[in-house]
């Protein structure tokens, strides 16, 4: 047994080296493709952020090699592969600032950092909205990707729900209107193959089915609420009982006249209720017109 093992060991070691070389070559090709995609995605998302109320902010997909690199893709026990990817949120106005450090000058990096650490819930929501806008179906592909090994050519792509928390925080005017339009567009039933083809991403035949997304937006914006298919009001109240009090959360669906009054309240509080309701009517009417004219074409971001 030992003699036979010694005889086949050189052949096995050579096969292992060949397999590792092939794997390393595949890792390099994949990494290069990721670098190109990261650059394109960073630019595309950053171009949209200003119209979403994030002027002077840029999104950056930062890539670096794991220890071991292409020569040893199996290095370490925590993961397999060569790439480490970070998503950064930076402020452009700081990117070109020169800082003197002794006799040297260097280009300062924009203030910011890892988006999960420095981004507010509203900023994260808007970045996610921008990514889904420039890369339609990306969220759904990520969620359904877990089932890729058992999917067949005709497998059903499950619909998903996306929650945007406070996406309109500190945003008004045109930015709020743009956010509302993009959210409404994402909730339509869209053919992934059609949309992805429009931006030259080669989606396979098994993704040709039409899918829809349920978009849940937690919002204080009248523009966003007016574009909703269903408007749910969430209210908090306190009831005092003897020496103690309790907090209650109540939800109710509004439509028709009650919805118009609620959107008017969101827009102006209790001021000028007549004018506010007329404004609410205009918002709802514009939203209905947008839905009636919705097509599979990529959304027009111009206002």
Image (tube, grey):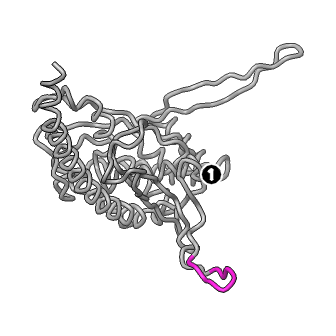
Residue visible at 46% across and 38% down?
Answer: 163
Foreground pick, 248 / 84: 84
Is-magenta flag for residue 175? no
- The magenta span reads 99-107
**Residue farthest top in this picture:** 242
Residue visible at 46% across and 54% down?
Answer: 87
Q: Is residue 183 above or below residue 251?
A: below
**Residue farthest right in this picture:** 243
Q: Where is residue 179 in the image (x, y as percent from the top left)?
A: 44, 54
Give left or right: position of 84 versus 202: right
Residue carrying label 1? 268
Quarter of the image where one finds residue 41: bottom left
Foreground pick, 286 / 180: 180
**Residue farthest front in this picture:** 3
For the stretch drawn in magenta, what is the main secondary structure?
strand
**Residue farthest bottom in this picture:** 103
User: Callout 1 environment at 10 Å: few (<14), some (14 to 19), or many (20+)?
Assistant: some
Q: Position of residue 224 (x, y in %)?
A: 47, 48
Q: Where is residue 3 in the image (x, y as percent from the top left)?
A: 15, 24
Which quarter of the rendering shows the N terminus? top left
Q: Position of residue 265 (x, y in %)?
A: 60, 45
**Can residue 154 be seen?**
yes
Give left or right: position of 13 versus 154: right
Is-magenta flag for residue 102? yes
**Can residue 286 be seen?**
no
Residue visible at 55% across and 59% down?
Answer: 172
Which quarter of the rendering shows the C terminus? bottom left
**Count of numbered badges drawn on the protein:** 1
Which element is circle 1 on?
helix
């Amino acid at each position: 047994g030992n003699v036979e093992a010694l005889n086949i060991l050189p052949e096995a070691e050579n096969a292992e080296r060949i397999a590792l070389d092939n794997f390393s070559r595949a890792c390099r090709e994949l990494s290069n493709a990721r670098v190109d995609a990261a650059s394109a995605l960073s630019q595309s998302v950053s171009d949209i952020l200003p119209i979403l109320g994030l002027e002077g902010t840029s999104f950056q997909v930062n890539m670096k090699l794991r220890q071991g690199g292409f020569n040893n893709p199996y290095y370490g026990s925590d993961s397999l592969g060569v790439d480490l990817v970070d998503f950064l949120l930076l402020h452009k106005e700081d990117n070109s600032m020169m800082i003197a450090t002794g006799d040297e000058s260097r280009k300062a990096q924009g203030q910011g950092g890892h988006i999960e650490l420095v981004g507010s819930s509203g900023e994260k929501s808007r970045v996610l909205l921008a990514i889904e806008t420039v890369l339609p179906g990306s969220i759904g592909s990520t969620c359904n990707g877990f089932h890729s090994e058992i999917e067949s050519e005709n497998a059903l792509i499950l619909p998903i729900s996306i929650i945007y928390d406070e996406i309109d925080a500190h945003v008004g005017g045109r930015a709020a209107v743009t956010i509302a339009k993009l959210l409404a567009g994402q909730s339509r039933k869209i053919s992934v193959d059609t949309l992805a083809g429009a931006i030259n991403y080669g989606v396979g035949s098994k993704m040709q089915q039409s899918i829809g997304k349920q978009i849940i937006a937690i919002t204080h914006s009248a523009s966003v609420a007016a574009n909703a298919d269903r408007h749910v009001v969430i209210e908090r109240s306190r009831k005092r009982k003897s020496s103690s009090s309790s907090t209650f959360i109540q939800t109710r669906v509004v439509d028709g006249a009650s919805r118009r009054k609620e959107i008017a309240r969101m827009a102006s509080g209790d001021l000028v209720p007549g004018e506010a309701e007329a404004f609410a009517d205009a918002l709802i009417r514009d939203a209905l017109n947008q839905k009636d004219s919705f097509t599979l074409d990529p959304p027009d971001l111009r206002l």
